[in-house]
Amino acid sequence: MKIAVLPGDGIGPEIVAQATKVLEALRSDGLKIEMEHGHIGGAGYDAAKDPLPEATLKLSKEADAVLLGAVGGYQYDNLPRPMRPEQGLLRIRKGLGLFANLRPAMVYPELVNASTLRSDIVSGLDIMILRELTGDIYFGQPRGIRTLENGERQGFDTMHYSESEIRRVAHVGFQIAMKRNKKLCSVDKANVLDTSMFWREIVSEVAKEYPQVVTSHMYVDNAAMQLVRAPKQFDVILTGNIFGDILSDEASMLTGSIGMLPSASLDANNKGLYEPCHGSAPDIAGKDLANPLATILSVAMMMYYTFGRADIAQRIEGAVRKVLQQGLRTGDIYEEGKQKVGCAAMGDAVVKAL
Ligand code: IPM
Ligand code: MG
């Protein structure tokens, strides 16, 4: 298992260090794991004046899987756009062809009170958001800021989806639904956007190939409301890049903390980049306060999706459950009566439970 490790910025290095402890523990158990580190985001800019240095992309292309922390920091906020940390993330997704972004939102029984929503609304929640990751308004050209004939300035972006882009991610969505509760809800804005009207047409066509899956379509504004009204109605949510960005942040709070949510971004051959859904949290960076569980759970997804080792994925998830049962909590999921621990202690506890 050749893994490129890209810690990135902010809390990235701390949380990734906990996840690599888990990988090292698995290695000493006999798994053949090779890890090589690289720079991305602000760290890439600092090291090579590029948020995705050539060497990092090469390392990531040669690896079977990439483990990423997070990117971004205040000190990079005023750089010209191509040098911003986020560009590193967008470019590595595009460069590796990682079009299928899986963002599961699961509520652990131990954390049911950590959600801001009533426990009867969220307990037992288990949904999978599948976000298309390399198309849409995120990458559409032309884009920019231009001056109109009347002298007024205007910002503009382009939203588009081609048939093949929709088809391939739809297939991934239906295949995931087949392994779960066989329900897929495709989210769009087909009442306003032509791109969405086309999205809905193609998803409906692909749906015919999966007759066992109950398919529905929902407008994104309604989906945003339904996610907080009755989130358990969903099994798989299939959506485009920008809607998926927004809905996955919303869904994360159903689970109590975005600090618990892993993600996988896969190409057509299950090569993947694995990262927590949360950002680099520069306000708490370097203070041993971050929750490493989303990153550790991302390693579980790596074992499952890239390496086909459901057994190891379950072992990691089991270890996470165990530390939660033991009452260990980082600040973001802390509640009275539990034991507050730092990032490193949480990582150590998971390794011990493993
Ligand atoms: C995410 C993030 C990124 C995105 C940013 C940092 C570019 O919000 O992974 O959800 O919008 O995709
Ligand atoms: Mg986001």
Image: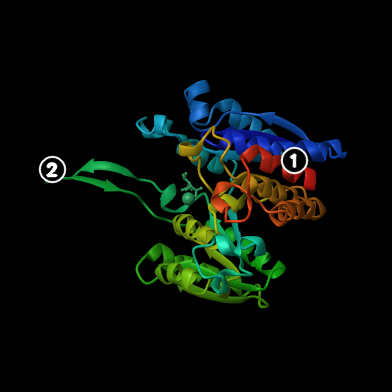
Per the image, label 2 sits on a secondary structure element best described as loop
Q: What numbered label is drawn on residue 22?
A: 1
Can residue 248 be seen in this snapshot? yes
x and y percentages locating residue 178 in the rendered image: 69, 69
Q: Which amino acid does label 1 sit on?
A: Val
Which of the two residues, 253 or 111, is positioned nearer the viewer here? 111
**Residue at image location 48% in from the left, 67% down from the top:** 187
Left or right of 136: which side holds 26?
right
Q: What residue type is labelled 2?
A: Gly
Q: In this view, does 169 lie above or below 179?
A: above
Task: Name the residue tied to disc 2.
Answer: 151
- Disc 2 packing (10 Å; few <14; some 14–19; many ≥20): few
x and y percentages locating residue 52 in the rendered image: 52, 31
Q: Do the residues labelled 2 and 1 touch (CB within 8 Å)?
A: no
Colour mapping: rainbow
Q: What numbered label is drawn on residue 337?
A: none
x and y percentages locating residue 344 in the rendered image: 66, 37
Q: In this view, does 6 lie above or below 168?
A: above
Q: How far apart are marks 2 and 1 (CA)?
A: 58 Å
x and y percentages locating residue 120 in the rendered image: 57, 74
Q: Which of marks 2 and 1 is nearer the N terminus?
A: 1
Name the quadrant containing residue 78: top left
**Residue at image location 65% in from the left, 39% down from the top:** 66
